[in-house]
Image (spheres, grey):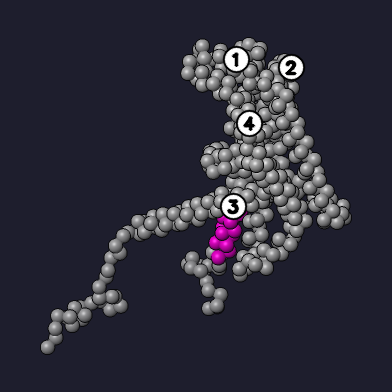
């Protein structure tokens, strides 16, 4: 006698499971869940990486500064090596040039700001007083900021003087970080070929060429950003300084130095330095000269945005302005001014690495799908022929 299960088994179609189970979630929901899990995993890894960088900032900061220095003067080092100079000697000469360039630029900028700082602050205070009569609270806030800026600096100096050990510790940490960054720059320049060989030795499987291309693309992005930004900052500072000198705006050299420093923070730095220059011109020379100063700043910005940026940085650094602004904001929230300076070149490096990774995957997928096809469109298997 046959039972019900035998009847169900006999009534099932051949080659089909007896129970056709439907998935709990549709395929679209499962794909969305997989993408969410991937995004959360990547965010967690990035969060842990940022946390480690903040905790180990004493070691991470010199490494990042050494990367920027190597990217800035890398062409000089390669030129010296091409002249049959010893690699160690070429790296040492490049580091000496780096010290002279950075030290000279820092001395010029700091001396210009110190010499004209009081005059700029006084002009900002006067401009804030004039604006407060027209705009109320905004002008009062700017006036308070200009009034207390020097007192804050004096208070900080007094605190550092009263706590001599703390001041010496800060100075010692700064000197140690600068010396370590200089030594790392020397080793990065001299031993770059050894780093490539180590990458090939330690890379898993046959991924060494792809990893080398990604590393080179990231470093080229940093190199292009540093060289392009320095050249653009120099042109902006010279043009604005000459324009302010022609307009007889007080503190023109200090304002030009502020423009040079601010150019390393894209968009935001140029806006702040230009606004300070216009306010100083408004306070000391009146509304007409302020409008002329505004025209000078706008003309320089147009020159930078439509001529210098496309000619210099478009080939190496291709990032949307929104990405740059988000990177600056994130860098400021993590490490303050230093984070704002380092965030854009690091984002440029990450963008270059992702671009190279995407191109590698596209090449792999293209090669895997380039098999021979038959007349009916099916892919022929070479092993079966």
What is the distance, in whole Å, between disc 3 and disc 4 at their CAs?
Answer: 29 Å
Residue 120, by quadrant, is top right
Name the N-terminal-most of marks 4 and 2. Answer: 4
Q: Nearer the viewer, mark 2 or mark 1?
A: 1
Q: Nearer the viewer, mark 3 or mark 2?
A: 3
| Tag 4 near tag 2, CB within 8 Å | no
Name the N-terminal-most of marks 3 and 2. Answer: 3
Most extreme residue toward the bottom, as rendered?
1
Local crowd size for mark 2, using a 10 Å CA cut-off: few (<14), some (14–19), many (≥20): few
What is the distance, in whole Å, between disc 4 and disc 1 at their CAs?
Answer: 27 Å
Q: What residue is shown with label 3?
A: 56
Q: Nearer the viewer, residue 252 or 146?
A: 146
Q: Is residue 86 in view from this perspective?
A: yes
Find out whether residue 180 is within the magenta segment: no
Q: What residue is shown with label 2?
A: 246
| Tag 2 near tag 1, CB within 8 Å | no
**Judging from the image, what secondary structure is the residue with disc 3 in?**
loop
**Judging from the image, what secondary structure is the residue with disc 4 in?**
helix
Q: Quadrant of the C terminus?
A: bottom right
Local crowd size for mark 1, using a 10 Å CA cut-off: few (<14), some (14–19), many (≥20): many
Q: Nearer the viewer, mark 4 or mark 2?
A: 4
Q: What residue is shown with label 4?
A: 158
Residue 177, position as x, y percentages in the image = 68, 47
The residue at 59%/17% (across/down) is 125
Task: Considering the whole magenta stretch, tell me its main secondary structure.
Answer: helix
Name the N-terminal-most of marks 4 and 1. Answer: 1
| Tag 3 near tag 1, CB within 8 Å | no
What is the distance, in whole Å, between disc 3 and disc 1 at their CAs?
Answer: 44 Å
Residue 375, position as x, y percentages in the image = 50, 67
Q: Nearer the viewer, residue 319 or 127?
A: 127
Name the N-terminal-most of marks 2 and 1. Answer: 1
Stretch in magenta:
355-368
């Amino acid at each position: 006698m046959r039972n019900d299960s035998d009847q169900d088994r006999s009534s099932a179609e051949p080659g089909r499971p007896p129970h056709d189970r439907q998935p709990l979630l549709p395929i679209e929901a499962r794909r969305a869940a997989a993408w969410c899990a991937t995004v959360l995993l990547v965010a967690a890894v990035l969060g842990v990486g940022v946390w480690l960088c903040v905790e180990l900032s004493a070691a991470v900061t010199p490494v990042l500064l050494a990367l920027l220095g190597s990217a800035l003067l890398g062409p000089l080092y390669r030129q010296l090596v091409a002249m049959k100079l010893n690699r160690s000697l070429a790296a040492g000469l490049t580091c000496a040039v780096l010290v002279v360039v950075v030290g000279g630029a820092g001395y010029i900028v700091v001396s210009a700001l110190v010499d004209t700082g009081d005059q700029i602050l006084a002009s900002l205070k006067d401009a804030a007083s004039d604006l407060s009569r027209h705009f109320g609270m905004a002008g009062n806030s700017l006036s308070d900021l200009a009034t207390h800026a020097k007192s804050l600096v004096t208070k900080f100096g007094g605190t550092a003087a009263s706590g001599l050990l703390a001041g010496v510790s800060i100075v010692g940490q700064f000197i140690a970080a600068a010396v370590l960054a200089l030594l790392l720059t020397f080793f990065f320049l001299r031993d770059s070929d050894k780093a490539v060989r180590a990458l090939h030795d330690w890379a898993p499987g046959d991924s060494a060429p792809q990893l080398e291309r990604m590393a080179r693309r990231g470093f080229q992005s940093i190199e292009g950003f540093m060289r392009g930004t320095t050249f653009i900052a120099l042109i902006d500072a010279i043009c604005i300084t000459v324009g302010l000198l022609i307009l007889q705006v007080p503190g023109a050299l200090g304002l030009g130095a502020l423009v040079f420093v601010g150019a390393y923070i894209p968009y935001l730095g140029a806006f702040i330095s230009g606004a300070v220059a216009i306010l100083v011109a408004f306070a000391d020379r009146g509304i007409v000269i302020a409008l002329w100063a505004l025209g000078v700043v706008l003309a320089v910005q147009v020159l930078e945005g439509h001529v210098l940026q496309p000619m210099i940085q478009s080939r190496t650094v291709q990032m949307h302005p929104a990405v740059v602004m988000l990177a600056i904001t994130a860098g400021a929230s993590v490490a303050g001014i230093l984070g704002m300076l380092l965030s854009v070149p690091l984002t440029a490096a990450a963008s270059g690495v992702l671009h190279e990774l995407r191109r590698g995957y596209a090449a792999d997928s293209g090669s895997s799908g380039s098999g021979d096809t038959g007349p009916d469109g099916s892919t022929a298997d070479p092993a079966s022929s």
